[in-house]
Amino acid sequence: MLEMTREEFEELVAEALDRIPPELTRLMDNVAVFVEDEPPADDPELLGLYEGTPLTDRGEWYAGVLPDRITIYRNPTLRMCEDRESVVAETEVTVVHEIAHHFGIDDDRLHALGYG
């Protein structure tokens, strides 16, 4: 497995978030991004996870709820990548993929767009 500290990986996630166009980040609402080392045991190769209510599904009832949660998993990414450059690229794809779920874009559409 490629070696990278948690702090280094968190910085890559922050950099990926910084590359999201401002016109999109302004639309993001009530969402927090976290880094964890390992995904749930039932899905050990999971790179990222979106948990929450997509913007497209929110209605007048949506108030006073906890923030949506995007989690990026460090170790599965490091296990699948051969070098730092591939970790940077995969982290960016994963961050964009999970943010797209926040905007209501499903996996089929993301795969078609190349964010599988």
Image (cartoon, helix red, strand yellow):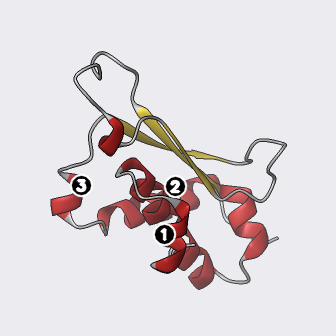
Q: Which residue is mark 3?
A: 25
Q: Nearer the viewer, residue 36 or 104?
A: 104
Badge 1 element: helix
Earlier in the chain: of badge 3 and badge 1, it is 3
Examine the image and state in which quarter residue 40 appears: top right
The residue positioned 84% from the left and 44% from the top of the image is: 42
Rounded to the nearest whole Å, what is the CA distance between mark 2 and mark 3?
18 Å
Q: Amino acid at mark 2?
A: Glu
56 and 32: which is toward the camera: 56
Q: Residues within 10 Å of mark 2 (few under 14, many from 20)?
A: some
Dot 3, crowdedness within 10 Å: few (<14), some or many (≥20)?
few
User: In the orientation shown, which residue stands out farthest toward the top?
Assistant: 64
Residue 38 lies, in percent from the top left, at 74, 48
Three-letter amino acid code at the position of disc 1: Leu
- Callouts 1 and 2 close, C-beta under 8 Å: no
Q: Residue at x 20, y 49 (%)?
A: 27
Residue 1 lies, with reference to residue 23, above or below; the image says below
Whether tag 3 and tag 1 are in contact, CB under 8 A, the answer is no
**Label 1 belongs to which residue?**
110
Q: Position of residue 84 (x, y in %)?
A: 62, 80
Residue 44, image x, y percentages: 81, 53
Label for residue 10?
A: 2
Quadrant (top left/top right/bottom left/bottom right) for the C terminus: bottom right
